[in-house]
Image (spheres, rainbow, N blue to C red):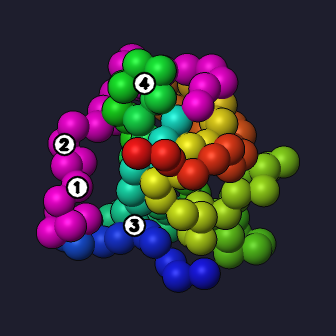
């Protein structure tokens, strides 16, 4: 399968609007939800992929980061089958988003992801 993770510059040139998506943990919807994976970019500072989602029932746009698994080199979550390094954008996924506290800072954690369906638009 063709790698669909874009550089930030290529994402912009393809017409994506990353500025419309929030990174703010206070604004990112939490819990289990259906969300469209609109596009993905490589993180600039760490070995990770930034996933740009739109929650299907509200239209909320947000970003979550998926980190590279150090032993496998894949961008997967424990107990999930989706490899974000290879999965297609434009599909709907059932995801579970939570917050964690680290060193007094709230961070967003993508807990689970399963491919649900192809976007029908």
Per the rendering, the mark at residue 26 is: none
Would you say residue 12 is visible in this rendering?
Answer: yes
Q: Secondary structure at mark 1?
A: loop
Using residue 50 as the reference point, say whether residue 108 is left or right of it.
right
- Which labelled disc corresponds to residue 28? 4
Q: Residue at x 15, y 69 (%)?
A: 13
Labelled pair 1, 4 in contact (Cβ < 8 Å)? no
Upstream in sequence: badge 1 or badge 3: 1
**Location of residue 4 in the rendering, given as x and y in whole percent from the top left corner:** 46, 72
Report the residue marked by disc 2: 19
Label 1 sits on residue: 16
Which mark, residue 42? 3
Query: Looking at the image, is mark 3 or mark 4 earlier in the sequence?
Result: 4
Q: Is residue 27 left or right of residue 92?
A: left
Other residues around mark 3 within 10 Å, as few (<14) / some (14–19) / many (≥20)? some
Q: Can you tell which of label 1 and label 4 is closer to the viewer?
A: 1
Q: Which residues are magenta?
A: 11-34
């Amino acid at each position: 399968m063709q790698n669909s993770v874009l550089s930030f510059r290529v994402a912009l040139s393809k017409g994506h609007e990353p500025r419309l998506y929030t990174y703010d943990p206070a604004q990112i919807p939490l819990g289990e939800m259906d969300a469209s994976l609109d596009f993905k970019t490589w993180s600039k500072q760490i070995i990770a992929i930034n996933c740009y989602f739109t929650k299907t029932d509200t239209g909320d746009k947000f970003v979550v980061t998926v980190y590279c698994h150090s032993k496998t080199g894949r961008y997967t979550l424990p107990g999930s089958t989706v490899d974000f390094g290879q999965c297609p954008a434009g599909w709907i996924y059932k995801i579970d988003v939570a917050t964690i506290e680290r060193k007094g800072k709230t961070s967003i954690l993508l807990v689970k992801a399963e491919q649900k369906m192809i976007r029908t638009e």
